[in-house]
Amino acid sequence: MKIDIPNKLPMLLNEYKEKNHLTNVEMIKQINDLISNPQDRIQLKVDDYGKDIPSSSFNSFIAKRHSTRPKNVFQRNAIIQLLDIPYIKTIFSDGNEVIEHLEKCYDVVIDNLKEIQQKSDLFRQEKNIYTRDMIKEMLIESSSIDWRAVAGFIWHFVNLLKGFEATFSPFNAIYGYLLWEELSKSDLILTLNELFLNQQIEADTKFVSLLLANNEKILDHLIYDIIDYKSDFFITFKYAKISNSSLGNPMLYGQYPVQFIPANLYSDAAHRINNLSYTKNEKRAVLNASFNMLEDLFDILGESLSSTTYMKVFRF
C-alpha cells in the first residue's frame, strides 16, 4: 500500500545521543546491551584504523532524510527500552498526527478503488446484485493485499453514510422516516438490493431490470460518496474538541462523540499500536490498526448522528 508510517526514531535517537553526550558507537553498544542474542544486535564495522564505526543500517535509523526503521524486532524493542518511551511515540507524537495519518489512509482507499475501477472486472459482472456483505467478500477474495484492505472500510463507511442521511434529512427529523430520494446513490442501491434479496419488497420485471442497470455503476457511486463525505467526517475531530470544551457552545456540549477528541483518539491509537512492537511486518500491522480505527470511528459517528437531536437542529 502506497503509504508509509511516520517515523520519529531519528529525532528521538539524536535527542537521546545529545542529551547523554554519546557517540553513535556508544549508543549502539547501549542498545546492544539490551539484546541477548548476538545475532540480533546492531552490527558495528571496523575501519582501516581498527576503530569501530556504525553500520549503514544504523546510520539510516538516525538519518534526518530517507530514514528507515529497524526490521529486526529485538533491535526495535531495545531502542524503545533505551529511550524509555511507549512504542507509539516512535510513530505519532499526539492525536493531531494520528488524524493526519488517518486522512492519508482514507485517501489511499480512494486511490485503490479508482485502481479497481480502471484495472479490474470485479464490479463489471452482468446482471449482478451487490450488497455491502458481497462487496466485502469480493474484495477479501481478490489477489491484491491492498484491495483486501479496502473491504472493511467500505462495509463500515455505509454505517457512516446511513447516519448522516438519517440525521440531516428534514423528513426523518419531522416525520421519522426517509424518502428514497434522500438516500445517496450508493446507499439507495445497496438498500434496495438487500430488501430485494430478502424478499421485503415486491419487484416486477421492470424494477429488476432497473436495479441491475444501477448495480453496474455501484463502484462509481461508492467512490463519489467516499470523496463527498470525507470533509464531513474529518471536520468532526475539530467539532468534537470544541464542543466538549469550555470554549464551545453549551447547547452542543457532548453532542459530538468523545472518541473524536484528539487526546482520546491518541489514547485509543496507543492501546492498539503499543501491542504491535514485536510484529515482523511493522508497516502492515500499523496500517491495519489505522484502518480498524477508521472503521470503528465510522460506526461510532454513524450511530451518534442517528441518535442525536441537537446535531439535527445545529445542522439546519
Image (cartoon, rainbow, N blue to C red):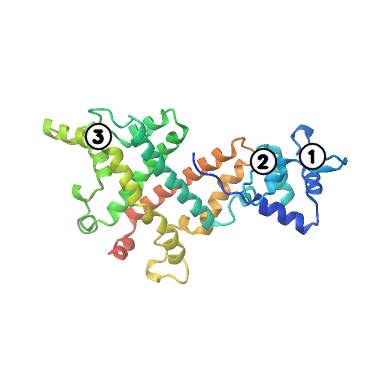
Name which residue lies at 50% across and 50% down.
101
Mark 2 closeness class: few <14, some 14–19, many ≥20 residues within 10 Å: some
Give above or below for 258 relative to 27. below
The residue that mark 2 highlights is 70
User: Residue 272 location, x and y as percent?
Assistant: 56, 45
Quadrant placement of the C terminus: bottom left
Query: For the residue marked with disc 1, what is the amino acid?
Result: Leu
| Pointer 2 or 1: first along the chain | 1
Q: Whole-percent x and y of residue 86?
A: 65, 50
What residue did someone put label 3 on? 216
What secondary structure is found at the residue carrying circle 2?
A: loop
Q: Earlier in the sequence, mark 3 or mark 1?
A: 1
Circle 3: residue type: Glu
Q: Is residue 145 left or right of residue 286?
A: left
In the foreground, 248 or 129 = 129
The reply to whether residue 179 is visible in this rendering is no
Q: Is residue 24 left or right of residue 60?
A: right
Question: In the image, what residue type sits under mark 2?
Answer: Pro
Name the spot of residue 187 as percent of width and height, x first.
27, 44
Left/right of residue 37 with respect to residue 174 in the rendered view: right
